[in-house]
Image: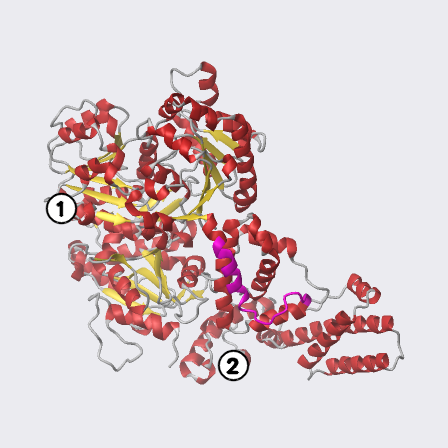
Amino acid sequence: MSFTELNSVEHYIIHQLSGENLNDPQGTPKESYAGKWQYQSPEQLQRSVNEVLLEEELKAALLRLNPEIQQRPELAEEVIYNLRDILISVNQIGLVRANEEFFQWMTGEKTMPFGENNRHVPVRLIDFELLKNNSYTITNQFRIHHRETKIPDLVFLINGIPVVVGEAKTPIRPSVSWLDGAHEIHSVYENAVPQLFVPNIFSFATEGKELFYGAVRCPLEFWSPWRITKKDLGIAKQLGLAEIGRELVDLLSPVRLLDMMRNFSLFTTNHKKQRMKVIPRFQQYEGTNKIVDRVIEGQIKKGLLWHFQGSGKSLLMVFAAQKLRRNPLLKSPTVIVLVDRTDLDTQISGTFNAADIPNVETTDNINELRTLLEQDTRKIIISMIHKFRDAKPNLNTRENIIVLVDEAHRTQEGDLGRQMRAALPNAFLFGLTGTPVNKVDKNTFWAFGAEEDRGGYLSRYTFQDSIRDNATLPLHFEPRLVDVHVDKETIDIAFEEFKESAALTDEEADALNRKSAKMAAFLKAPKRVSKIVEDIARHFKEKVEPQGFKAMIVTPDRYACVQYKEELDKHFPAEASCVVISTTANDDFDFKKKWALDKGKLEKVVDEFNDSHSSLKFLIVTAKLLTGFDSPILQTMYLDKSLKDHTLLQAICRTNRLYPHKTFGCIVDYFGVFDDAATALEYDEAGVDKMITNLSELRGKLPEAMKDALSHFPNVDRTIEGFEGLEAAQNAINTNEKKDAFANDFKFLSNLWESLSPDAILDLYTQDYRWLAQVYESVKPASDTIGKLLWLTLGAQTTKLIHENIHVGNVHVLDEFVLDADIIDDLANNQDPKKVRQLEKLLIKRFQKNAGDPKFKSLSERLEELRKKAEQGLISSIEFVKELCKLAKETVQAEKEYEQEILAKSPQAALTELFLEIKTDQTPAVVARIVADIDAIVRVVRFPGWQTTTGGEREVQKSLRKALLKYKLHTDQVLFDRAYAYIKEYY
């Protein structure tokens, strides 16, 4: 038996989750890992193609879970009526808002006047406490009709409500991946049958090798993998169906699914005022539950979480705060979220507010924070660590206070951390950091790291984990030329005198450079700055701007920011860049007037920078926005400042956020900070090497990558142009397996090319790369739904190169043979024997293809006669070429007429002929519309071989009757019989 997506992946998932083996229906069902899922075939569901809910099952759950409805069963219909109303409303309010409204019902937040004296009581659709009170159904090939009919592979229902949709793809074709399934769900099903997704928790897609899941309307680049933590291996990943089975059993276990629904589904608003649904990535889910479990257990009062920069710590804190507040065992706790900088405070507050989290308080000053704690406020409080300054001991001694500290490695060092502990002596303290804590940060381990936790971390999600899971992007590091580089020995000598330079404010950076006058003079030497800015302008125009990304310039101090801005204005319009710095009371009036940005102006600048259509391309900073600044469109950082340890890592990770078509973050280093990166970040030298890709390494990979891509075309002469050269190339990769293998190698080469462009090394390979790119385009599948993982959109540089350098020969191998006056003149005046022979050969092929048609036989005979005349010298070579071109034109016309004849024999044409033939004065005049309706409805229900099955004939007859009913023609039995006979013949 062959391996298909149905029998190898879809049936495997059903077997793993329900124990039912559809490949061997007579076999003994195995005990499923998940324990609760029961398989039902589509026929067993007893629903029509238009129904989203299994209403009988839902009604039974309403009676089972609601005493008021149990006493008055007719009330169940009232609830179901409300739910149907939301399903129908999806066309008016959009899928995300409909999903949000339905979720309020599913999570028990909606009430109805079913109690005594019409008292409102909560309506329960699902039991979150006793999971066995719910029914769990898995089915496949779930036919659903809305705007059109679609058949998702897998649907999971709780109490008759479809909560998960899954798409399985074949595991044996390299060009097909989970991404094809995700595309089908996101771009096809969610648009064609949106009602199915109104109750959706999430959807998933897999080809049996990788599993990814995403919420409704979630772009594909933000779909996430699910991981299983193994005690000995940490977050491990193995290939194959067995691993996918384990991941799905874990992800779709009822306890996980209902937890995800109730505690991890956020509805938030983005900058464009669009409503979005957010569900957690694996690390956010695991980190949140580790915090909650530790607080509930109450034994260990602290924990340290290291989740790499960009992997979603802000949302993790939102999930944790929300779940802690909802847990009845914690008796309405106070959750304090602490940050150490204003920009982080703004970011965290914005995240909480956008997600509409209830009972959130932000504090504007020290007194507000003290008052909230003294009054025993039971809310989520967002504040900054410095507001604990001079706080009195034992400000609040309650046990159920939980403090979540963002960027813990800095915040908890010094007096402020001790004062906060003294003020809240019994609080739980959890530190979250995006950079690993090494030996420099002993205080952080002392403050948060529990001895019971392996390695000192409650939860650990490294940069290797985040890159592997597509949570963040890899970083490319590009050192610049020596003549714009700071001499490393000078740096070491100049900075040896000063203390740790991490996390300097704008003002502290100024002070540091004042102390090192020689260094400051060197860094800000006008010639040096001019040369660097010239290099930045060139790099940005060639590599960043064409791809729609933006950049940040990091300078030594605030005055250097201004200097860079003035120099940059020589290369770009003034509105293309903005200086973002702090000003102080001691600054000159003119300096403050020109460069000061208050909180409101800063927010506008950030919004403008994040807008892909705005003219703002650069932010020029020295310390501000190096932490707590999430801007996915930021791809390149031009770095001309000394940064060390976690500050260095935090800064460069501003560029690693996911964004459409962005494949890496780029750091262009003018200072030399990476010359000893592994030493500066001692915690994991091997890891740093993996994370930061030096472009010199990429250059070393280019020759081998080019060789691998060309190896698919042995003995193909790449100098041959036109259709002969292209045909030879395509014949070398003439199977799906060969095409997929070539696509894989070319994809790798293309990524290298994009990363290195416009490096001079590419000049050596441009001719071969151009040839490969054109061959790639010629065999790339036309459909947008095929092979998303391998057949990716080419990068901007590659696309530009193809567009500029495609030179197709005069003879095109296309469905239509194009000959115009210019080509005929060219053949007549430049009688290249090779091109004339190509034209002859092509015509012979076309005649052979249509050998059965008299027109082509006649044309073929004329060609043979023309060739004989030429051989016997009866006509001149110019006349031969002209006659040949004339014959070619007639061939094109004959092919067009032949296609129209074929089209005339199509099913629709046959039906049209029938209706025109029997049309009477009483028959509706809209024959074309009748035929289109019949064609559309029959195509939906028919299947190969339907004519030989009773069920198939019945379905088609029912569909035909339905189509005729619309035009009041259903009572005409003669018409029905003749139309059905046509359908049976032509469909």
Residue placed most toward the observer, 747 or 277: 747
Mark number, residue 296: 1
10 Å crowding of disc 2: few (<14), some (14-19), many (20+): some
Mark number, residue 984: 2
Q: How is the image coloured?
A: secondary structure
Q: Is residue 796 magenta?
A: no
Give the amino acid at mark 1.
Ile
Mark 2, secondary structure of its residue: helix
Residue 203 drawn at (x, y percent): 35, 59
Which stretch did the figure color magenta? 700-722
Whether residue 328 is visible to the viewer of this picture, yes or no, is: no
In the displayed structure image, the side of residue 391 where residue 980 appears, left or right: right
Whether residue 686 is visible to the viewer of this picture, yes or no, is: yes
For marks 1 and 2, the one nearer the N-term is 1
Q: CA distance from mark 1 to mark 2?
A: 67 Å
Q: Is residue 710 magenta?
A: yes
In the displayed structure image, the side of residue 132 where residue 657 appears, left or right: right
